[in-house]
Image (cartoon, rainbow, N blue to C red):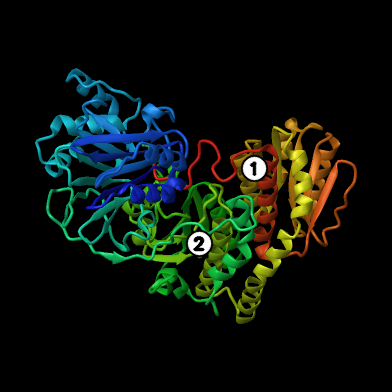
């Protein structure tokens, strides 16, 4: 969350900074801003609207410069207001010497604020970031690189920062600890950014900074020191970053486009998989899979639900016990580690701060067998894990994850089969059947997408509700959880999901005629139990909205609305059922007129705790 771009060049850099911000907007969109070195002064423009508005302001003000920094914010400390937008200036707005942008949280900001206030600094914002700007100004000794190296020693918490000084017009200094930051190398110009995508089209020569690094960017030189102040060489990688999202085409929102891309991206994710083998996850996977006797999955949000689905798969097919943990909880709790654990992290961006910290924590407990399911091959998560499967969902713009989720499920199903094979639990015939089913997934998903008109009709009803319940059983319980999450994050309708058997233990008290109850009803071994749970809802007047499989013998009637999925899909059924729930959430949000691709208070990539 929060996106940073900075540049030192011999040409006007505002187009580069603005383009970078547009590509980083997925990280946060509460506010944005740019600061430039202009004729010996620091000048800044900030907006609480989108980057397009900032661009307009900058054009109007004819703001141009050769050195500068820019930021798109997801507020942690202080409201998303103009005075809290980055860049922050020090010592004051009128007499600025230092400009600074930050991604992360400074945990000792209160005590630093007290100290700096006593020194005469006047704070203009409620952010934790502003303390860094004043601290750098206070410690400034004419050499910004040296100053920042000393200043960051006073910070606790997480940061990626980029800073420049009025007094050193051709220099930007940046540092990272706990938040991502890359350097882009140009010809007589250099750049810094939160990710390589921000610089696509400007440079593909990328250095991934490591924890504790401080970097000095000048026109013809990039100098990096590690946390001990020792000069270090970091590898330069040629990175073909995606240039962002393609055109919307016939779709109204990126989320809708991404839902409809699922047949293709699942096909892409499985492309080249001609047989099940551990090496799909990297060299050495066979040995790792042979050594482990349990799996620990760490993830957050939607990725956590893909992990929960995988637990059902791995335990029933590979017969290996699986524990799925919310990464932000796992990292802080006392757990019982075991060296024979395969630690699996799941993250779309590969940057999720809590999941990265969970992984680090697991390693510190002696669990060295690590594997990630990730959509970004160059991400920290992939670099940190020994094994990986890179999903090929492509760039996902909508904040509410759709195609990233289903491609994760496809990868996790491959993991299930690979573990089963190494564990002696996958016959050749079973392998062939599973592969056939996986290859058919794009067609099967397309058939679910064709249900959109019926789902739109339901969404009209949902748009008028303030609450909804989602029910599922077995491996469709995590799908119900994901459906409820989708609905709440984009339509702002309060939604909760329960395993259907839990209803009578509490949530049934909420059921009235006003309560829509979405039921995921595949034709599996639990269908009769689920039908009884549905009766319990009907008996209390609840309105059932049932996604049933074609052959599940559930019929529409008073208070029972049924949409039939075209086929029953066995173990892969969660991948089909979630698509119908994505469409329901999407169309409910559209009917309510929300900002579907950028829902309030959220961001796409969660790089703070
Ligand atoms: N703490 C800073 C930066 C927030 C951030 O990195 N969000 O992802 C602020 O609130 O401005």
Q: Do the residues labelled 2 and 1 touch (CB within 8 Å)?
A: no
User: 476 or 341, which lies in front?
Assistant: 476
- Taking the image in four quarters, ligand 1 sits in the one at top left
Say if 278 sits above or below 488 in the image. Answer: below
Question: Within the image, what quadrant is residue 81 found in?
Answer: top left
Looking at the picture, how far across and down is residue 170, in whole percent? 17, 47
User: 429 or 483, which lies in front?
Assistant: 483
Question: Would residue 192 appear left or right of 229 to someone viewing this image?
Answer: right
Could you tell me which residue is drawn at 48 percent across and 43 percent down? Answer: 603
Q: Can residue 155 be seen in this view?
A: no
Question: Would residue 605 appear left or right of 519 to someone viewing this image?
Answer: left
Looking at the picture, how far across and down is residue 367, in whole percent? 36, 57
At mark 2, the secondary structure is loop
Could you tell me which residue is drawn at 72 percent across and 37 percent down? Answer: 463
Looking at the picture, how far across and down is residue 224, in whole percent? 17, 53
User: Pointer 1: residues within 10 angstroms few (<14), some, or many (20+)?
Assistant: many
Q: Which of marks 2 and 1 is nearer the N terminus?
A: 2
Residue found at the far right of this picture: 557
Per the image, the residue denoted by label 2 is 394
Could you tell me which residue is drawn at 20 percent across and 45 percent down? Answer: 173
Per the image, the residue denoted by label 1 is 487
Looking at the picture, how far across and down is residue 438, in whole percent? 63, 71
Q: Ligand 1 within 8 A of label 1's CB?
A: no
């Amino acid at each position: 969350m929060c996106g940073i771009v900075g540049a030192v060049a011999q040409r006007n850099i505002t187009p580069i900074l603005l383009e970078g911000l547009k590509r980083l907007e997925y990280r946060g969109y509460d506010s944005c801003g740019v600061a430039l070195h202009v004729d010996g002064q620091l000048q800044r423009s900030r907006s609480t609207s989108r980057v397009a508005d900032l661009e307009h302001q900058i054009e109007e003000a004819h703001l141009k410069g050769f050195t500068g920094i820019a930021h798109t914010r997801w507020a942690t400390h202080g409201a998303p207001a103009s005075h809290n937008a980055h860049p922050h200036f020090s010592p004051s707005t009128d007499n600025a010497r230092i400009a600074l942008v930050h991604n992360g949280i400074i945990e000792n900001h209160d005590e630093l604020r007290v100290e700096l206030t006593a020194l005469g600094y006047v704070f203009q914002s409620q952010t934790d970031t502003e303390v860094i700007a004043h601290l750098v100004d206070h410690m400034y000794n004419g050499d910004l690189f040296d100053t920042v190296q000393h200043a960051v020693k006073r910070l606790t918490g997480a940061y990626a920062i980029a800073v420049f000084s009025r007094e050193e017009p051709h220099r930007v200094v940046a540092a990272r600890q706990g938040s991502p930051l890359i350097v882009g190398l140009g010809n007589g110009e250099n750049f810094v950014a939160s990710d390589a995508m921000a610089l696509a089209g400007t440079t593909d020569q990328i250095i991934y900074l490591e924890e504790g690094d401080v970097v000095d960017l000048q026109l013809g030189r990039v100098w990096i020191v590690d946390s001990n102040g020792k000069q270090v060489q970091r590898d330069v990688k040629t990175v073909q970053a995606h240039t962002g999202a393609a055109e919307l085409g016939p779709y109204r929102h990126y989320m809708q486009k991404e839902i409809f891309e699922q047949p293709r991206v699942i096909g892409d994710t499985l492309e080249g998989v001609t047989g099940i083998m551990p090496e799909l996850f990297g060299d050495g996977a066979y040995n790792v899979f042979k050594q482990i006797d349990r799996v620990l999955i760490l993830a957050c949000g939607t990725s956590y639900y893909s992990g929960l689905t995988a637990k059902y798969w791995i335990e029933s097919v590979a017969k290996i016990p699986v524990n799925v943990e919310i990464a932000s909880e796992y990292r802080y709790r006392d757990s019982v580690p075991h060296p024979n654990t395969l630690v699996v992290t799941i993250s779309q961006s590969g940057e999720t701060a809590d999941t990265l910290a969970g992984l680090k924590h697991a390693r510190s407990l002696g669990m060295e067998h690590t594997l990630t399911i990730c959509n970004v091959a160059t991400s920290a998560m992939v670099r940190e894990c020994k094994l990986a499967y890179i999903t090929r969902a492509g760039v996902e713009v909508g904040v509410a994850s759709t195609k990233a989720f289903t491609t994760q499920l496809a990868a996790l199903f491959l993991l299930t089969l690979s573990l089963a094979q190494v564990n002696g639990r996958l016959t050749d015939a079973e392998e062939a059947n599973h592969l056939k089913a996986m290859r058919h997934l794009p067609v099967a998903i397309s058939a679910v997408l064709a249900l959109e008109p019926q789902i739109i009709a339901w969404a009209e009803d949902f748009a008028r509700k303030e609450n909804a319940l989602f029910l599922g059983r077995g491996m469709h319980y995590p799908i119900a959880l994901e459906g409820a999450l989708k609905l709440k994050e984009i339509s702002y309708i309060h939604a909760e999901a329960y395993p259907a058997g839990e209803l009578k233990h509490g949530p049934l008290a909420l059921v009235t005629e006003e309560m829509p109850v979405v039921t995921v009803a595949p034709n599996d071994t639990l269908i009769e139990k689920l039908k009884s749970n549905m009766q319990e809802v009907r008996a209390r007047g609840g309105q059932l909205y049932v996604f049933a499989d074609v052959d599940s013998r559930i019929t529409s009637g008073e208070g029972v609305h049924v949409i039939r999925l075209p086929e029953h899909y066995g173990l892969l059924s969660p991948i089909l059922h979630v698509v119908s729930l994505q469409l329901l959430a999407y169309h409910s949000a559209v009917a309510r007129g929300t900002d579907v691709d950028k829902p309030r208070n959220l961001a796409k990539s969660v790089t703070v705790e």
